[in-house]
Amino acid sequence: MSPESIQNGDSASKSIDQRGMKRKRLQSQEHGSGESSTVNGELRKEPSTEPSPRDDQDDYPVGNFSPDTKLRLGKSISIRDLENRPHGGVQASQDTSTNGRLRQLRSQATILRKFRQQLPIWPSSSTIRSFLQSDRPQVLILTGETGSGKSTQVPQFLLSERWCRNGCIAVTEPRRVAAIGLAKRVGSEMGVRLGKEAKGLGKRQEDSVGWSVRLDNNVSRARGVRTRIKYLTEGMLLRELLRDPYLESYAAVIVDEVHERSIGVDLLLGFLRLLLFGEGDGPKRKNPLKLVVMSATTNVESLKEFFSEGCPDRKALVEQISTEEAEGEWEGFSDAESEAFASKKPDAPKKAHVAHPQDNKLAKAQVGPVSSYHVEGRQYPVKIVYLNEPTQDFVESALSQIFEIHRKEPLPGDILVFLTGQDTIESLERLINQCAQELDRKLPRVLTLPLFAALPQAAQQRVFERPPSFTRKVILSTNLAETSITVPGVRYVVDSGKVKVKQYRSRLGLDSLLVKPISRSSSIQRQGRAGREAPGICYRLYTEPDFLQMENETMPEILRSDLSGSVLSMKACGISDVAEFPLLSPPPRDALEKALIHLLQLGALNDSGDITEVGKQMSKMPLSPNLARIIIEASQPELDCLEDVIDIIACLSVENIFINVVSDEKREQAHEARQNLYRREGDHLTMLATVQAYLSEHSNRKAWAEKYFVSHRAMQSVMDIRKQLLAQCVQMGLSSNSSFQNSEPEKRTVTILRCLLKGFMGNIARLMPDGSYRTILGNQTVAIHPSSVLFSKKVEAIMFSEFVFTNKSYARGVSSIQMDWIGELLAGSGI
Ligand SMILES: Nc1ncnc2c1ncn2[C@@H]1O[C@H](COP(=O)(O)OP(=O)(O)OP(=O)(O)O)[C@@H](O)[C@H]1O
């Protein structure tokens, strides 16, 4: 079985309408963007994946129920019953008025309340609230099994607190798909309208739940609407900090899935610690902020230590606890005691009960600024199955595991498979579709759905939809689905045990992408995507000894990444001495210095290390400093190639716009078909030509993409990102006039490449006499990646956008440049 043999590409065609290459400026409308899915290997045309007005409504994801989940509501109602009713479980009503809609939402919330009451976290509601009741800033570190109800319930528990009555709760999630899914679910549970759907109710206040993620800010701005809970990605809250440094619009912040230790989480924890405890200047807000840090798998002690270090009352707190311990009145909360209390075990230590804040007014006043609590219990068991022998090829093992489950297990029971990236997902998708065509007709059909970051948002949301009847969903995901999300219907998890991680090599100043074993914490999170609606099974495609050898936790991103973006965020938020910024895992000093130097070279900082105007603009963009610098350069009136550069950057933000073909025959066909898109200057201008040709296609973009072996899916994401970047540039007053389009093509090409060079000045290599390329900074040998249009070409120097290390060091996204440009650039940047 070869993964590419299922391609539907037409025979190669050389003729691209040259007029079609000229596009309308600023055009970002999609045409023919209907996404396809594959049911039993047959391509099906689905409705357009462009967000429709219904996408923000909770028509299917009224709680995203799986069809047969019994709510355990007592005798008669199952989720299937609910789904069969319009509006997720409310009697059919012709009343489409606002009041009618609100009534429907409320009935649905009443039904869901019974489900919520069954969650392991439910009995701990008042305990959790009592940790945050003092009139000082407080932190609660909350742990509990996957699926116990942390992400959906904790914000709702806090809403009724006195200190929260007029505020909003921000809940951060590592990824947008989780933020949107949770907002929808919690909106249904609360019985309120979501985001912009809430319009206000005249004299009465209307409560709402919203979300804010890249490309999509769904928060109502209507008068009379109070957004009570807002789910957002960590990056979005960091950006809000730039606008509202004291986060005055929030009464509480909940940082969810802290174990992921993304750079965003670590920076947020640092900013929040400063905001809560001031450190030097005292707390910085009028009302004390409450912070809850949550995860199923985290190191509670290190978090406690981190926040306690920043807390000015720390000494007093420690003394107070120890005095009272001696008196036998206050025990604080050891995990065992909390657990015993939460589960109301008859043998719970009496002292723990006495010490419980909700039961003891004195103790309530003494709950310290930093506490921790563990919620005991999980909803449904998940059986773990290991391989007996290690596998050499996890894609093939996943394929046989999927079909074993499919043949053996009855419906319902969708399968969620964890893989490393878009490339492995797409190969497995093709293999599954091939095998599915040969399936016995008596077996259910198979619907494969990919899920990775570069997928357009609407396509990502499809994994939450209910499959057609007699069909099993097989979701192929990166670690995007690893935490926070509940994919309805999933009973089986297949875990490859691998993840693709970015690793920064500070000596070389280059990022590389590596496939590595996951940590135990990730493995537990992956397992936890089953057992959320019914008992489940997790098939680990590794042996038990391999599991035991895994690192406990994933290495924090801040210790393995280029820190330029983080340092820029700190500088933009007014942190002058970044080495003093509180971080849970402080990175080595030389990594910080490298980042400072890099930002200086980019012109984001001045010689005194202060942020410049250019740096401030860069910090507002949802891009790495390199890419943000390129955009600013391109918007200079004398260069003025902003829109072309945006098209290239949008392509760089997805994994690959071209379909990865494997066999020699297909490769030749693809090469032939793409001839008119290829540019001799290299990959960046080839990307630009491809976007322009795609935009000029008005009849059927999907067919166009197939014909040129271009990934339609990737191009849809490119269109999304492009639209967002154009809007962002307009908002920031960066614009271009049309004269650039009229200038000579040769001159335009040089201008674009020189703009790119401004951001990629660390990624340049020159040709050596022996025919190899060596980087100018770092003196590292790199080869041009086989996927590049410049593969095996010899040019005097190259610039590249990505460094990949597989069996050797490769430059990916390569353009040919001239040595004299480099000379001018280096002279200007003071390197
Ligand atoms: N979108 C949804 N559709 C259906 N059920 C959901 C949805 N979101 C949550 N649930 C149900 O609510 C339960 C609690 O989910 P929640 O996300 O609050 O748990 P959690 O403790 O935060 O889990 P994790 O640590 O894995 O993120 C889930 O196990 C599931 O049964």
Image: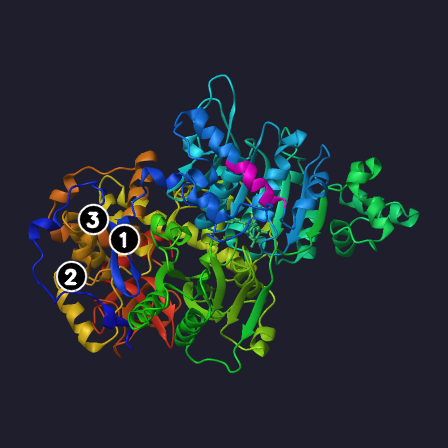
User: Where residue 32 is drawn, which disc sits there?
Assistant: 3
Q: Disc 1 marks which amino acid?
A: Glu
Q: Disc 2 marks which amino acid?
A: Lys
- Please identify, in this view, whether the residue under mark 2 or under mark 1 is nearer the observer: 1
Residue 42: say if magenta.
Answer: no
Q: Quadrant of residue 421?
A: bottom left
Q: Position of residue 503 (x, y in %)?
A: 46, 65
Mark 3 crowdedness (10 Å alpha carbons): few <14, some 14-19, many ≥20: some
**Residue occupying image coordinates x 44% and y 34%:** 195
Q: Disc 3 marks which amino acid?
A: Gly
Mark 1 crowdedness (10 Å alpha carbons): few <14, some 14-19, many ≥20: some
Mark 2 crowdedness (10 Å alpha carbons): few <14, some 14-19, many ≥20: some
Left or right: 52 as drawn, with respect to 132: left
404, above or below 812, in the image: below
The part of the chain drawn in magenta is 108-117
Is there any visible trace of residue 776 in the rendered image? no
User: Where residue 35 is drawn, which disc sits there?
Assistant: 1
Q: CB at mark 2 closer than 8 A to ligand 1?
A: no
**Quadrant (top left/top right/bottom left/bottom right) for the C terminus:** bottom left
Q: What residue would you read off at disc 2?
A: 707
Q: Quadrant of residue 708?
A: bottom left
Q: Position of residue 624 (x, y in %)?
A: 40, 51
Q: Position of residue 353 (x, y in %)?
A: 82, 47
If you read the primary sequence from the N terminus, does the residue marked by circle 2 or circle 3 appear first? 3
**Most common secondary structure along the magenta stretch:** helix
